[in-house]
Image: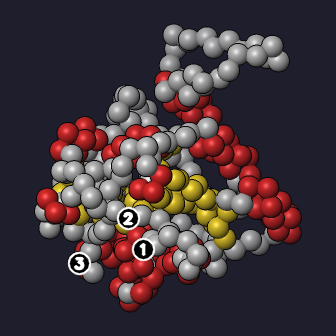
Amino acid sequence: MKFDLVACKKFGRCALSKITSQSYNSSSNDLLTPNSSSNDIRILLGILTLPDQYHHRHFLRLIYGTQFPVGAKVDVKFVFCNLTKEDQNVLVSLEIMHYDDIIILNCNENMDKGKTYAYFSSLPDMVNSSDGPYPPYHYVLKADDDTYFRLKALIESLSPLPREDLYYGFGSPCSSMDPFVHYMSGMGYLVSWDIVEWIRDSDIPKNNVEGPEDKIFGDWLQKGHKAKNRFNAKWSMYDYPEPRTKCTHELWPGTVAIHRLKNQEKWIHTLKYFNVTQNLKPSKLYHISFFLKKKILY
């Protein structure tokens, strides 16, 4: 299978190095083959959030628990630092017992003082298993809890891309389409498993953990000469249309991710646009009508 330039143009801009036709030979075990579970892409989607955000976690479980992408296994986990209150100990423990979708890092809660490093560097020891496949995930994604990922579109955009030395996201600054200019926005970015292991092992990330987490992450890769394969998913990833900035975009069907969904109205407007309830089955047990409002809720 050759590298899919059509998909590349549809979903964003690619910058791939050292790729030959042999790398994408149809017999390779690293390819995604439709309807073949043995070649499914394995992705860990880690949503960085806070322990007290119980209601928002339940909401996001509805959002991701009703998406069933074909050709991929996507594990959604909620990620935060050490618990600090008695009610957190009880309520988070109940969540883990019921959902088993939480990762608690050994750190003090923070945004730009090492939480992202703790997330990526802890994963190899957490999820590697002699009984499971290697790598346990082809890709690891870090996402904000105000970002909505459409998993089917994400998988389609990833399927033609390399599974090694890959860095994927919304390239910064907003005006640039060059994935090598700076770094991928913190709204949500993804790297291949080999980069996750490098983050654990290298002194470069370990000695540079404080600062804007997305920028610092890009600095690590630059200093370590990593991520020679990059994919700028702009404008399939973007900020919510309002308030308008250079990073915003109108909602459109080719969307992979939308950022800055800061309130319920923005979430509902987005979910209605993508018709996420279209598979609701009719039943005598309920009656639900969906009304189209002329006024768009920003």
Give the spatial CA distance, label 2 vs label 1.
Answer: 7 Å
> Which amino acid, by three-letter code, is at mark 3?
His
Judging by the rendered image, the residue that carries numbered circle 3 is: 225
Of residues 291 and 19, the one drawn nearer to the viewer in this rendering: 19
Residue 154, horizontal then vertical, whole percent: 40, 45
Above or below, 25 relative to 290: below
Above or below, 61 relative to 205: above
Judging by the rendered image, the residue that carries numbered circle 1 is: 196
Say whether marks 2 and 1 touch (CB < 8 Å): yes
**Mark linked to residue 267:** none
Residue 127, horizontal then vertical, whole percent: 57, 73
User: Nearer the viewer's eye, disc 1 or disc 3?
Assistant: 1
Seen at 42% across and 62% down, the residue is 139
Q: Residues within 10 Å of mark 3 (few under 14, many from 20)?
A: few
Element carrying mark 3: loop
Residue 31, horizontal then vertical, whole percent: 32, 56
Locate residue 271 relative to residue 13 in the image: left or right. Answer: right
In which quarter of the view is residue 189 placed?
A: bottom left
Can residue 177 be seen from the camera position used here? no
User: Nearer the viewer's eye, disc 3 or disc 2?
Assistant: 2
Judging by the rendered image, the residue that carries numbered circle 2 is: 191
Element carrying mark 2: strand
Of residues 40 and 36, the one drawn nearer to the viewer in this rendering: 36
Can residue 3 be seen from the camera position used here? yes
Say whether marks 3 and 2 touch (CB < 8 Å): no
> Which amino acid, by three-letter code, is at mark 1?
Val
Of residues 127 and 78, the one drawn nearer to the viewer in this rendering: 127
> Which amino acid, by three-letter code, is at mark 2?
Val
